[in-house]
Image (cartoon, rainbow, N blue to C red):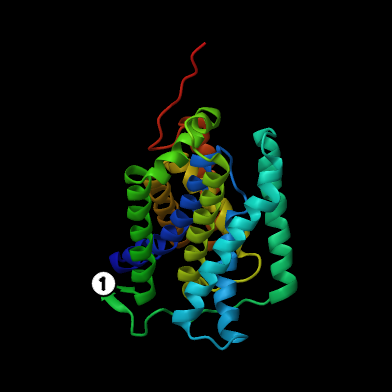
């Protein structure tokens, strides 16, 4: 295979992998606060792209207005998901909360199908221009947006958790909710903030990916599962690991499609996930935990 083709697969893999990383960051946000996995995260990604598309189609809004509006709407939905479905279940076993998030995922996907239809839709790229030559490969301007926004979100999250009182309070809730409450932390507010941030990050992933891979009501299923695989691969609860896991899966998918067949592309993430669960359950960048007895 020519080096230019190999490089093109790497570029494509990094672009899509960055979106997997953003989805994984959404999982990380909620896990770090509640200790549960939100399987509705993929639907936040889908809604980000779909709402941006239909804000332009139905509302006649320009792209610079439609994109922030869709992100804000999905963020509000994240708050609603917490208030209407998660908060009434507080105190229930974690598995019950996970099942609730699966139900929310099905509800959001079904609602999107009824409102937006089953067709595939495209969002215009954020900036016009021809593809940029890169060592024989071609780099789309939208790919630069994808990688740049992903890195900006990652840095912002790192600063948020390490340097702000709210971020440290969210981490305290994940470690021990009762102790955090006794220290004066409003656990309910922290959980709501985590769902808002998770929805925001997911919506960002949806709007930056839609100009490249298109969007539809059912794209959130695979994006969510691959984001979860990336989260496990990088180490559950580790923001940098989540993005690294997304990039690894994206690149391996792209190379697998190029060297083997595109029919195996979607299976690669789950093969990696299964292998990792057997060999290193804590993830590549996670720390093995031990229980004191």
Image quadrant where residue 150 sits:
bottom left
Please report the residue visible at 67 percent of the width from the left and 38 percent of the height from the top: 90
Residue 189 at what x, y percent from top left? 54, 46
Determine whether the residue tagged by mark 1 lies in a helix, strand or loop.
strand
Quadrant assignment for the N terminus: bottom left
Residue 54 at what x, y percent from top left? 60, 80
Image check: 137 left or right of 67? left
Is any atom of residue 140 visible in this view? no
Q: Looking at the image, which residue sits at the far front?
A: 184
Seen in the picture, residue 184 relative to 250 is either above or below; the reply is above
Is any atom of residue 245 visible in this view? yes
- Count how many numbered circles sit on residues in the image: 1
Q: How many neighbours does mark 1 have within 10 angstroms: few (below 14), some (14-19), or many (20 or more)?
A: few
Identify the residue under disc 1: 134
Please report the residue visible at 69 percent of the width from the left and 63 percent of the height from the top: 109
Please report the residue visible at 56 percent of the width from the left and 79 percent of the height from the top: 53
């Amino acid at each position: 295979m020519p080096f230019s083709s190999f490089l093109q697969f790497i570029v494509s893999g990094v672009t899509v992998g960055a979106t997997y990383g953003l989805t994984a960051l959404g999982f990380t946000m909620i896990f770090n606060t509640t200790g549960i996995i939100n399987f509705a995260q993929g639907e936040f990604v889908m809604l980000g792209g779909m709402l941006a598309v239909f804000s332009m189609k139905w509302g006649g809004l320009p792209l610079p207005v439609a994109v922030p509006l869709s992100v804000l709407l999905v963020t509000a939905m994240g708050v609603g998901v917490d208030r209407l479905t998660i908060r009434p279940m507080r105190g229930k076993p974690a598995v019950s909360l996970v099942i609730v998030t699966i139900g929310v995922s099905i509800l959001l996907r079904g609602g999107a199908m009824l409102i937006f239809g089953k067709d595939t839709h495209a969002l215009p790229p954020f900036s016009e221009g021809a593809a940029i030559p890169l060592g024989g490969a071609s780099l789309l301007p939208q790919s630069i947006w994808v990688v740049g926004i992903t890195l900006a979100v990652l840095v912002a999250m790192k600063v948020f958790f390490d340097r702000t009182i709210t971020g440290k309070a969210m981490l305290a809730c994940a470690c021990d909710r009762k102790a955090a409450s006794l220290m004066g932390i409003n656990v309910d507010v922290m959980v709501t903030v985590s769902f808002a941030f998770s929805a925001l990050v997911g919506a960002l992933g949806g709007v930056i990916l839609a100009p490249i891979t298109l969007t539809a009501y059912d794209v959130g299923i695979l994006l969510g599962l691959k984001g979860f695989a990336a989260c496990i691969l990088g180490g559950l609860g580790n923001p940098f690991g989540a993005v690294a896991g997304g990039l690894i899966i994206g690149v391996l998918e792209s190379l697998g499609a190029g060297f083997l067949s595109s029919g195996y592309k979607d299976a690669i993430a789950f093969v990696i996930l299964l292998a990792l669960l057997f060999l290193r359950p804590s993830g590549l960048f996670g720390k093995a935990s031990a229980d004191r007895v």
